[in-house]
């Protein structure tokens, strides 16, 4: 693996760690933060957004870079790649909708969908990385 490929993979995994891990961590912290007052939860979410969206942008950019680096034979694995790409889009759209939700139900539904889709994208990324065919 070349230095450039290592850099691409490192940036992609780092961004995924922030995007996926951050969502899960924030979801775990919200119940503990709620009793401290309404603004505490919003402040934590606002702070997370400052790193989450740049990480998502790095994920998309390095994801495009990853696909561009595939050989034609590797690109033939479109089923797995398509599922991953759909999950990435759903995660981003759901996270965006979560930020704009005004009800507790909307926050819960969009937040859960964003996190589950992010986990699916992560799973399919691991599958793609480990699939030699």
Image (spheres, rainbow, N blue to C red):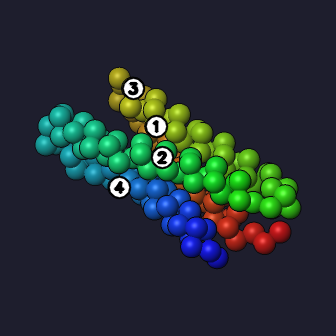
Q: Earlier in the sequence, mark 2 or mark 3?
A: 2
- Sort mark 3 into few (<14), some (14-19) or many (20+) by Cα contacts within 10 Å: some
The span from disc 2 to disc 4 (Cα, nearest Å) is 16 Å
Q: Earlier in the sequence, mark 3 or mark 4?
A: 4
Q: Earlier in the sequence, mark 2 or mark 1?
A: 2
The answer to whether mark 2 and mark 1 are in CB contact below 8 A is yes
Regarding mark 4 in the picture, which secondary structure is present there? helix
The answer to whether mark 2 and mark 4 are in CB contact below 8 A is no
Regarding mark 3 in the picture, which secondary structure is present there? loop
Mark 2 against mark 4, which lies toward the viewer?
Answer: 2
Disc number placed over residue 101 in the picture, else none = 3
Query: Which residue is at the far front?
Result: 3
The span from disc 2 to disc 3 (Cα, nearest Å) is 20 Å
Mark 2 against mark 1, which lies toward the viewer?
Answer: 2
User: Where does label 1 land, which residue?
Assistant: 95
**Residue 122 appears at what percent x and percent y?**
57, 57
**Residue 91 appears at what percent x and percent y?**
54, 42
User: Where does label 4 land, which residue?
Assistant: 25
Regarding mark 2 in the picture, which secondary structure is present there? helix
Please report the residue visible at 41 percent of the width from the left and 56 percent of the height from the top. Answer: 18
């Amino acid at each position: 693996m070349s230095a450039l490929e290592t850099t691409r993979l490192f940036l992609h995994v780092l961004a995924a760690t922030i995007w996926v891990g951050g969502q899960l961590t924030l979801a775990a912290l919200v119940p503990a933060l709620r009793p401290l007052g309404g603004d505490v939860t919003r402040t934590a979410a606002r702070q997370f957004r400052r790193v989450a969206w740049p990480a998502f942008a790095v994920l998309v950019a390095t994801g495009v870079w990853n696909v561009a680096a595939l050989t034609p034979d590797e690109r033939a694995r479109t089923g797995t790649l398509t599922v991953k790409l759909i999950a990435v889009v759903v995660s981003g759209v759901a996270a965006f909708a979560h930020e704009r939700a005004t009800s507790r139900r909307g926050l819960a539904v969009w937040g859960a969908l964003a996190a589950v889709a992010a986990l699916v994208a992560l799973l399919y990324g691991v599958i793609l990385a480990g699939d030699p065919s």
